[in-house]
Amino acid sequence: MPADEDRALKSPYVGVAQTGLAGIEWGQIRTLPNALSILRILLLPCILFCLIQQTRIYDVLALMFMSVAVLTDALDGYFARRFGQISNLGKVLDPVADKITVGAIVIFLIQLRGFPVWPALLIVGRDLIILGASLYIIEHRKLIVSSNIIGKLTGVVFALMIIAYTIHYYTIGTYLVWLAVACVFISGVSYLRVFRALMRNASQDA
């Protein structure tokens, strides 16, 4: 096996899923870290409602809800490590919550804030491809690919970009859009290397 593929397979961001999607511990949904991920999804309708109103007070409320969502994203991993509640469900639920939240908000910002369409398509398309590939790897390779440092930095850029457009800081938002586009390609290549290594290893095992 090539050295780069071996490193990808031994990455701390690749975990065992036991028996595919059916082997994920759904009972773990009641733990604090996973509850925080669920809360992030539940905050999404509140954020979208506030954005639709397009008034200053609702922009502030949207920003508050977004801040809570970002906080839950930071705390779910912390609490999982702090209380020994790291689970395969959490490794799946956390990025799914992120992608649903980012994708929905970006789509709404196209209409409500004039967010450029082509970067939105890149962002949403990237997330859908990564999500689909991750689910395929879980089911067929019994492995979970968690977010690496590049993916986490990309998420931070996405969050700052969304906040800038929410509070009408369009000049800053435009720069962040270009930075986000760069992150889409860089993180996409990073994930592609991992997925390719996993699938190539699978073909060798067959």
Image (cartoon, rainbow, N blue to C red):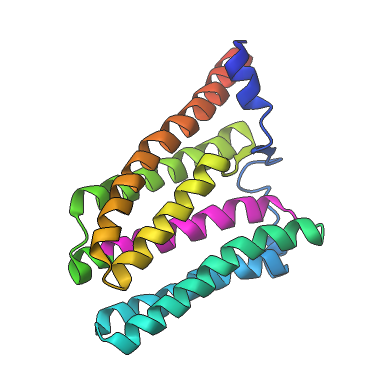
Q: Quadrant of residue 50?
A: bottom left
Q: Which residue does the image show at 33% across and 50% down from the upper left?
A: 124
Q: Indicate left or right for 74 with 120 as reference.
A: right
117 to the left or right of 91: left
State which quadrant residue 206 falls in.
top right
Q: Is residue 18 magenta?
A: no
Q: Is residue 206 visible?
A: no
Against 10, is 178 above or below? below
Q: Nearer the viewer, residue 86 or 23?
A: 86
Q: Is residue 104 magenta?
A: yes
Give the vertical position of 192 relative to 110 (above or below).
above
Q: Residue at x 65, y 65 (%)?
A: 75
- The extreme front residue here reads 171
* 56 or 11, nearer to the observer: 56
The residue at the point 65 percent across, 63 percent down is: 76
Q: From the viewer's perspective, is residue 61 above or below residue 93?
A: below
Q: Which residues are magenta?
A: 85-107
